[in-house]
Image (cartoon, rainbow, N blue to C red):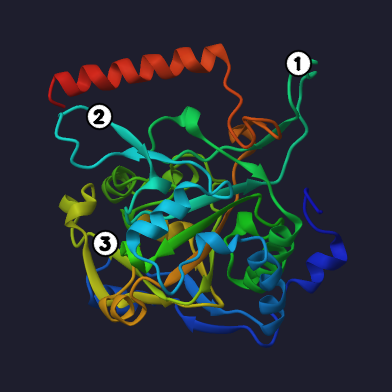
Amino acid sequence: MHCAGVEEEEAAEATKAPTETKVLWGPVTKQVTDAIGAPAAVASVLLRTSSATAEVAARMKALVPVNILPTAGDTPKSLAARLAQSEYLHPKFVLSRGNGTGRLKYIDLNSTQYAQPRRVRWGVPMEVDRPQHEHETSIVRLPCYPHSYARSPLDATCEVVPDAVYQLSLLLWKEARPFLAPNSVSAPPNYWEQCFYYTAFQGAMGRHQDNFRSEDLLYYLTTKDTSVLASGKKLQVPNSSVLIFTTGNAPMTLKLSYPVSRQTAGDRAKYVLHPKLSIELGAGTLFILAPTDDLFFAHEIAFDAETLQKHGSRGYRIALVMRWIRDVHFKEFHGSGPYSKRLLVSPSMVDSEDERQRKIKKERSRGK
């Protein structure tokens, strides 16, 4: 496995997309976005990947246990019951809906019928920079990418990327390379999330930004300070792309939304949608999200009504999301044993999390 990049001749080969690669959507010119009231041109593109990709993608598909895919006789309840027992999917604790107590209660997403995607997380390992104690199981240093809606950053999970996934992403990176942001060109991604969406649960992901916040856009529109492009949440390498490769039997529609004025830029709930910024992600497509688009636009994804009706409980989409994560966000994870794939939690991390939770409770009690 190549962990630090690619060799010179390999990089030279990658400067051109294979002839079978086709642009299906994007970029969108400023003339078009001006006409619909969007704040900037769109640099993102959707590609139809080459036939060579399909052959390599089959190796990744072989990793997926059949019992986490929907079957002909499935109901939402039966599918959720199987997912709850899966050792392949990573646990994800999210807020329980409608518990009626007024208190925060969390539940493992895999046991629910919620719309959010179920996930598996992988990373390229870095060498552990300290001696390991005899009582420790194998420890690996991997990217840590916590989600804001999760119960705690200490619940983070990650595993060493399987070779089948790495080889597929290397091929996809080569095909995407002519369209990538500058800091994604020199080396392939180092972090992956395999996201499972199911029509049985009306699978979707709500409006969000990956590496920026709506406040970042408001700041930029107010100050025109371009340094914001190099900051964001600082999990991802500044000025790097996000790649999303789709497999499965049911397409989903990704929509870019945007503020029509500076006054609404800081509130994503007030962003608007337009048909020109609606993109169907079907099997064999690769969406390349440009970092500037993650600043100027939010994005969301869902199955449309026609797809839900056509597939009933048997539809699914698997999205392989690839990112470039900064080295400072690599943390130690258990590589084996009963805590395999879970974050190695130190006493100081527990203390920090306890303090964070106390602040959250104090803010809630004040009605913030």
Of the residues shown, which amino acid type is indicated by label 3?
Tyr
In the rendered image, which quarter contains the N terminus? bottom right
Residue contact at pointers 1 and 2, CB within 8 angstroms: no
Q: Nearer the viewer, mark 3 or mark 2?
A: 2
Circle number at residue 135: 1
As helix, strand or loop, the secondary structure at mark 3 comes to strand
Asked if residue 297 can be seen in this view, the reply is: no
Left or right of residue 21: residue 203: left
Asked if residue 234 can be seen in this view, the reply is: yes
Left or right of residue 147: residue 273: left
As helix, strand or loop, the secondary structure at mark 1 comes to loop
As helix, strand or loop, the secondary structure at mark 2 comes to loop
Q: CA distance from mark 3 to mark 2?
A: 31 Å
Quarter of image, res 313: bottom left
Q: CA distance from mark 3 to mark 1?
A: 52 Å
Question: Dot 3, how many residues are within 10 Å of its Cα: few (below 14), some (14-19), or many (20+)?
Answer: many
Q: Earlier in the sequence, mark 1 or mark 2?
A: 2
Of all residues, the one furthest to the bottom in this rendering is 20
Q: Residue 23's x, y, as percent?
A: 53, 83
Circle number at residue 258: 3
In the rendered image, which quarter contains the C terminus? top left
The number of callouts visible is 3
* Residue at the spot 49% in from the left edge and 74% down from the top edge: 45
Question: Dot 2, how many residues are within 10 Å of its Cα: few (below 14), some (14-19), or many (20+)?
Answer: few
Q: Which residue is mark 2?
A: 104
Q: Nearer the viewer, mark 3 or mark 1?
A: 1
Q: Nearer the viewer, residue 307 or 255?
A: 307
Q: Earlier in the sequence, mark 3 or mark 1?
A: 1
Of the residues shown, which amino acid type is indicated by label 2?
Leu
